[in-house]
Amino acid sequence: MRIRKLRLSGFKSFVEPAELIIERGLTGIVGPNGCGKSNLLEAIRWVMGEGSPKSLRGGGMEDVIFAGTATRPARDFAEVTIFTERPDATADEDREVEVTRRIERGAGSAYRMNGRDVRAKDVGLMFADAATGAHSPALVSQGRIAAVIAAKPHERRQMLEEAAGIAGLHVRRKDAEQKLRATETNLARLDEILSDME
Ligand code: ATP
């Protein structure tokens, strides 16, 4: 999956709407200390479904909303849109996928995919199937290389599975197992009812 463009508004230090075109190949972000390099990477991980405020250097998820400065008031919402391209898309799948995540103070966050409201889980599965996502090793933030070197074997395995695009299969397997268990319980209940009737 290729990221073509990123649009942010009210996300951390990006208070004004900003749009970044991401060219093909490896992209590096450079700039003076505190200019918002890490915030950009965090915006990509956030729109891909990052659920841990701590890994976005915040205490709560609303900390991603512009908190105001001495001269500018805080914002009530943050919104990030990522424009992606799936080179492997089949004819009936969308080749261009546009995902938006928006958070409002006191109202939590919501996702849209190509203009339709979707669940966080749908977004997570779409990115996992495309071998990317909020924890993709393709997004190299500060300290990430040291973390990969120090990772435990099962953490390395997770990274490899994400890179291979099979992380979504685990989620689907868990769902299927839950449905199977619920069906087995229903069948057992049905057997009891039938034997009571005999
Ligand atoms: P460095 O090179 O030092 O790692 P950086 O370019 O990666 O810096 P970031 O860490 O992305 O910079 O940005 C830090 C800036 O973002 C700080 O000025 C901080 O005040 C600002 N910032 C973070 N969260 C918010 C927020 N919710 N509202 C307003 N500003 C924020």
Image (cartoon, grey):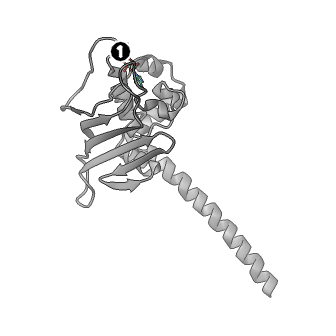
Residue that lies at the very extreme toward the bottom in this rendered image: 198
Q: Position of residue 93 (x, y in %)?
A: 27, 57
Residue 175 sits in which quadrant? bottom right
Query: What residue is at 36 percent from the left and 39 percent from the top?
Result: 79
* 165 vs 36: above or below: below
Q: Quadrant of the C terminus?
A: bottom right
- Seen from the viewer's position, the closer of residues 103 and 75 is 75
Q: Position of residue 61 (x, y in %)?
A: 50, 34
Q: Quadrant of ligand 1?
A: top left
Left or right, 160 with respect to 17, comes to: right
Some atom of ligand 1 lies within 8 Å of the CB belonging to the residue at label 1? yes
Query: What residue is at 25 percent from the left and 46 percent from the top?
Result: 86
* Residue 133 can be seen in this image: no
* Residue 191 can be seen in this image: yes
Q: Position of residue 144 (x, y in %)?
A: 42, 21
For the image, the number of numbered tags is: 1
Asked which secondary structure carries label 1, the reply is loop
- Where does label 1 land, which residue? 34
* 96 vs 178: above or below: above
Q: Amino acid at mark 1?
A: Gly
Q: Quadrant of the N terminus?
A: top left
